[in-house]
Image (spheres, rainbow, N blue to C red):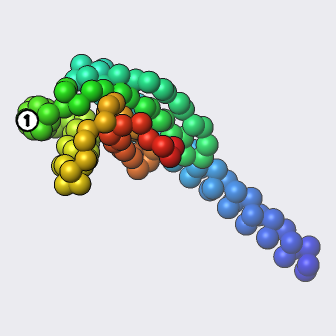
Amino acid sequence: MIDKLLKTFQDAGDTIRDQASNLSTGAKDKAYAVIEDWLQIFPQLKAYGLHVESFALGVALSPSLEVDMKGTHADFSMDKLDEILADEATNTALRSVMSTIRTTYALHRKINAELQEPLIVKIRIKLSPEVKVFIGEPLIQ
């Protein structure tokens, strides 16, 4: 009786392990697909004036890609950002980056601080992409 019970628990554990493995493989595949989609926008960002400064791939249960880009404020006036956002209406990833830059400038303007070069855009691509924009060199990284 105890042997049967132990066998049942062992079989259940094996099944759970197999399902967890399948789930992690699916999540990993989805994360790589998201990364592949985002890789398409980096040439466009370069054309707009953002240059890749660092590039890193993190491999785990949920892979991620981290890219730091630099640009100058002169290349990203509010009018220019509005133009890009209008032109790129269907490009969700590019719009995400440009709208984050635009919002950062708008908030920065509210504190009446001087713009510090460079413009830094940090993009972390994972199942939930994250975009951060810095005006000047960040002290905390």
Q: Is residue 26 above or below residue 35?
A: below
The image quadrant that residue 125 belongs to is: top left
> Seen in the image, is 91 located left or right of residue 34?
left
Q: Is residue 141 above or below residue 80?
A: below
Q: Is residue 61 above or below residue 37?
A: below
| Residue sitting at x 23%, y 54% | 111
| Residue sitting at x 61%, y 43% | 60
| Residue sitting at x 67%, y 53% | 18
Percent across and percent down for residue 14 are 74, 59
Count every numbered label the image shows and give the total.
1
> Seen in the image, is 58 located left or right of residue 139?
right
| Residue sitting at x 25%, y 35% | 94
Name the foreground residue: 34 vs 93.
93
Name the foreground residue: 57 vs 90.
57
Percent across and percent down for residue 5 are 84, 76
User: Which quarter of the rendering shows the N terminus?
Assistant: bottom right
> Seen in the image, is 66 located left or right of residue 49?
right
Percent across and percent down for residue 130 are 39, 46
Going by the numbered disc 1, the residue's amino acid type is Asp
For mark 1, what is the residue? 79
The secondary element bearing badge 1 is classed as helix
Label 1, residues with CA under 10 Å away: few <14, some 14-19, many ≥20: few
> Seen in the image, is 128 located left or right of residue 50?
right
Judge whether residue 43 can be spotted in this image: yes
Judge whether residue 32 can be spotted in this image: no
Percent across and percent down for residue 8 are 79, 70
The image quadrant that residue 43 belongs to is: top left
